[in-house]
Amino acid sequence: MPKITFVTEKKEIEVPAGSNLRDESRKAGVELHPWIFKYPGLNCMGNGICATCRVLVKQGMDNLSKKGIVEKLSLNTIHAFESIGHEDEMRLACQCTVNGDCTIETKPPMNISGETFWQKPYPNR
Ligand code: FES
């Protein structure tokens, strides 16, 4: 069974292969949605639109399903601001199928002070 390690919560869980990262996190009591967005109706309930379930995959990206069209659209357009500097490791938990071990950082802060933050909109500067 794949193992999910939550860095911030210092928690490890085993989940069935093919399970959904958001669903399994919630079952284990790991809250992915920040602030008031944990309440039903204040997030998109797993449809890949609100991006409040975004996580950073610290290890095991290859053990998660590939990004689908909904996740790519969400992270690259509507929520591009939140993913700046984390493009390669940010995923929407609700869109991830867990197929093997992975290490997850929940509720990642925005990279406002990161050195790549202001470079992204103007890559040729
Ligand atoms: S729950 Fe809204 S994008 Fe995942």
Image: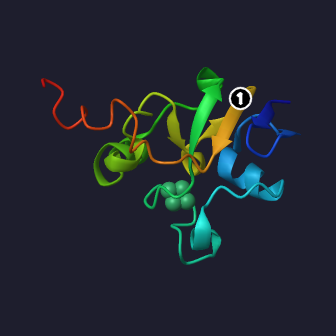
Q: Is residue 8 above or below residue 5?
A: below
Q: Can you say which quadrant of the picture contains the N terminus? A: top right
Q: Can you say which quadrant of the picture contains the C terminus? A: top left
- Horizontal and vertical percent position of residue 48: 47, 55
- Left or right side of 111 for 14: right
Q: For the point 57% across and 32% down, which residue is it?
A: 65
- Left or right side of 100 for 70: left
* Residue 59 visible in the shown view: yes
- Horizontal and vertical percent position of residue 85: 40, 33
- Left or right side of 8 for 10: right
Q: 109 or 94: which is nearer to us? A: 109
- Left or right side of 27 for 122: left
Where on the picture, by quarter, is residue 78? bottom left
Q: For the point 57% across and 70% down, which residue is it?
A: 37
- Horizontal and vertical percent position of residue 12: 85, 38
Label 1 SS: strand
Q: Is residue 31 above or below residue 123?
A: below
Furthest-left residue in view? 124
Q: For the point 63% across and 28% down, which residue is it?
A: 58
Q: Amino acid at mark 1?
A: Cys
The residue tagged 1 is: 102
Q: Residues within 10 Å of mark 1 (few under 14, many from 20)?
A: many
